[in-house]
Image: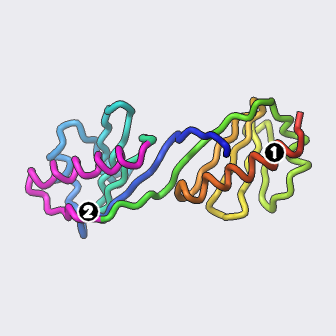
């Protein structure tokens, strides 16, 4: 089993049919709302980790920057409670959904990216060291993407742990079996 580190998790919940973003902005003194840049109220939080909560006009609450799903859900629900206390109509029974997760592992050997690019057999791969210092590989599942760095670090992003963990396992096994040096 490939050991990995969760780098980021994005969790969302539909907490209202709609949100009045000006009212939401007034609820949180530290909130940022620049609708010309981002059509959402942004709350930056520092827990054990830095996190961002975005509240959108369509009633969606999105939390990113944390590495534990439960922490992201807790942050969403604490935000809902603060909105309720400010009499902003929200649904405290909304279901949370993991939108995406980023995990990484480190192989015990450096990787020759040029040789790896030539040996791997994936329909969508990109390697242009002038543009990006890594190999980008789209997995068998279109929602899985791998970044391979010459140091041996492999990053995988996808919709949830149940998808990315086995995908990373399979992909790293393939890299190791190519005995890339």
Look at discs 1 and 2 and give the one toward the viewer. Answer: 1
Q: Position of residue 49 (x, y in %)?
A: 39, 32
Residue shown at 59% from the left, 59% from the top? 163
Element marked by disc 2:
loop
Residue shown at 19% from the left, 51% from the top? 24
Residue 23 visible to an observer of this rendering: yes
Taking depth in this image into account, of 138 and 180 the one nearest to the observer is 180
Residue 23 magenta-highlighted: no
Residue shown at 61% from the left, 54% from the top? 164
95 to 63, vertically: above or below: below
Q: Say which mark, if any, is on residue 15.
A: 2
Q: Position of residue 30 (x, y in %)?
A: 22, 36
Figure quadrant of residue 109: top right
Q: Position of residue 72 (x, y in %)?
A: 36, 47
Left/right of residue 10 with respect to residue 167 in the rendered view:
left
Segment tinted magenta in the rendering = 68-94
- Please name the residue that numbered disc 1 is placed on: 175
Q: CA distance from mark 1 to mark 2?
A: 42 Å
Residue 37 visible to an observer of this rendering: no
Left/right of residue 71 with respect to residue 67 in the rendered view:
left
Element marked by disc 1:
helix
Name the N-terminal-most of marks 1 and 2. 2
Taking depth in this image into account, of 142 and 104 the one nearest to the observer is 104
Residue at the bottom extreme of this rendering = 17
Taking depth in this image into account, of 146 and 29 the one nearest to the observer is 146
């Amino acid at each position: 089993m490939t050991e990995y580190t969760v780098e980021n998790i994005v969790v969302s919940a539909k907490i209202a049919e709609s949100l009045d973003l000006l009212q939401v902005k007034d609820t949180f003194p530290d909130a940022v709302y620049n609708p010309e840049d981002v059509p959402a109220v942004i709350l930056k939080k520092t827990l054990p980790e830095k996190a961002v909560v975005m509240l959108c006009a369509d009633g969606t609450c999105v939390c990113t920057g944390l590495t534990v799903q439960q922490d992201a859900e807790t942050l969403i629900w604490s935000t809902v409670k603060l909105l309720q206390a400010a009499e902003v109509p929200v649904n405290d029974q909304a279901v949370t959904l993991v939108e995406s997760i980023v995990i990484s592992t480190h192989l015990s050997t450096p990787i020759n990216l040029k040789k790896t690019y030539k040996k791997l057999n994936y329909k969508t791969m990109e390697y242009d060291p002038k543009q990006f210092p890594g190999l980008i590989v789209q997995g068998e599942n279109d929602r899985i993407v791998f970044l391979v760095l010459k140091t041996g670090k492999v990053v995988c992003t996808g919709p949830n742990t149940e998808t990315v963990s086995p995908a990373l396992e399979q992909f790293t096994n393939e890299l190791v079996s190519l005995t890339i040096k």
